[in-house]
Image (tube, coloured by chain):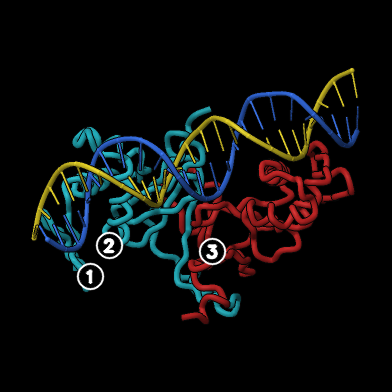
Chain colours: A red, B cyan, C blue, D yellow
DNA sequence: TTACTTGCAAATCGTTTGCGATATA
DNA sequence: TATATCGCAAACGATTTGCAAGTAA
């Protein structure tokens, strides 16, 4: 169970996280977006509401929110990291042309976990699956 | 068919790529390794044979070799990019503790491609699957 | 010659960090 | 008052780039 009040976020068996104004606005703006912004993109949005906020604060708070499990930092092939307000497990698609990242609401693929047995000496804990292609906008362009 | 001679590499229907001394040594050192080095790691190795080579040259040539399809640039979750002399499709495992990256010789998982239909408006061209866990060395440590 | 490649250093990009000021419990 | 967070600017690590000199067809 996760409850987010105005000022404090309670997570199961974790200590409360103070929700400052900056933190709240960052979270709100992130939740508005279906695609997953970079820190800089988010900074530009947040700046419209808190003009004096600094990029460092955005980075710091994205880190804090991700550590708390409230958002997710997604590591895609591009150079910049992107952030996601949806923390349930799901896959992502990335446009190789414009870099946009969307969710892919397909069910988890069982076979991925099944296939590993005997193939590695690593102790596998997770995997990342990222699809690549052209987004609806880029695919219709010359 | 791909033929690499001393000085020129011919790729099907692409223009020949001059193999300079630097380029050849970079490629040789990369091919010696089972794990996949970062540009800096490779630079240190190459430097033992060409002491005056610069890091910029290593980066430039890795780019050229990757563009030509002779090596592959692999984008894993870490910050640094890693490079791979094996260009056939395969999956990678990354150690979350030390960053080491190995090949995972499992057969391609058909279900991954099958599951997509109807779930996205993207034109999907490829996917990346990366496993994460602890490598044989790190998993036996406290 | 002509086109490419090199070494070097500086620039760039995304991100992190130190610090003194500020806000909040 | 004690603690955490802020804005700012500087630092950082990885990578790219401009340039003049070098190399090879």
Secondary structure beneath dot 3 equals loop
| Residue B34 visible from this viewpoint | no
- Dividing the picture into quarters, in which one does residue A35 lie? bottom right
Mark 2 and mark 1 lie on one chain; the one further toward the N terminus is 1
Pinpoint residue A6: horizontal percent, then vertical percent: 89, 48
B58, B112: nearer the viewer: B58
Dots 2 and 3: beta carbons under 8 Å? no
In three-dimensional space, the C-alpha distance between marks 2 and 3, rounded to whole angstroms, equals 23 Å
* B69 versus B84 height, above or below: below
Pointer 2 chain = B
Between B133 and C2, the one lying in front of the other is C2
Q: Chain of mark 3?
A: A
- The residue that disc 3 covers is A99
Q: Secondary structure at mark 1?
A: loop
Q: Is residue A20 left or right of residue A84?
A: right
- Residue at 69% across / 66% down in the picture? A34
Determine which of the numbered discs, if any, sits on residue B74 in the image.
none
Q: Is residue B43 visible?
A: yes
Residue occupied by mark 2: B68
Label 3 and label 1: CA atoms lie apart by 27 Å
Residue A107 lies, with reference to residue B137, above or below; the image says: below
| Residue A11 left/right relative to B105 | right
Q: Is label 2 in contact with label 1 (beta carbons under 8 Å)?
A: yes
Closer to the camera in the image, A67 or A35: A35
Which quadrant of the view contains residue A93? Answer: bottom right
* Above or below: residue A8 compared with residue D11: below
The residue carrying pointer 1 sits among few (fewer than 14), some (14 to 19) or many (20 or more) residues within 10 Å by Cα, namely few
Mark 2 falls on what kind of element? loop
Q: Which residue is mark 1?
A: B14
Q: Position of residue B51 (x, y in %)?
A: 22, 33
> How far apart in space, not on screen, are marks 2 and 1 (Cα)?
8 Å
């Amino acid at each position: 169970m996760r409850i987010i009040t105005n000022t404090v976020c309670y997570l199961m068996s974790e200590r409360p996280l103070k929700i400052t104004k900056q933190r709240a606005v960052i979270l709100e703006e992130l939740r508005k977006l279906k695609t997953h912004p970079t820190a800089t993109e988010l900074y530009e949005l947040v700046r419209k509401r808190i003009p004096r906020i600094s990029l460092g604060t955005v980075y710091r708070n994205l880190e804090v929110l991700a550590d708390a499990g409230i958002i997710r930092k997604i590591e895609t092939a591009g150079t910049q990291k992107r952030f996601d307000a949806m923390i349930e497990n799901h896959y992502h698609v990335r446009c190789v042309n414009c870099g946009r990242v969307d969710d892919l609401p397909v069910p988890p693929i069982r076979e991925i976990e099944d296939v590993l047995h005997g193939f590695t000496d690593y102790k596998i804990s997770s995997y990342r699956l990222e699809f690549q292609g052209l987004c609806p906008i880029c695919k219709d362009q010359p």
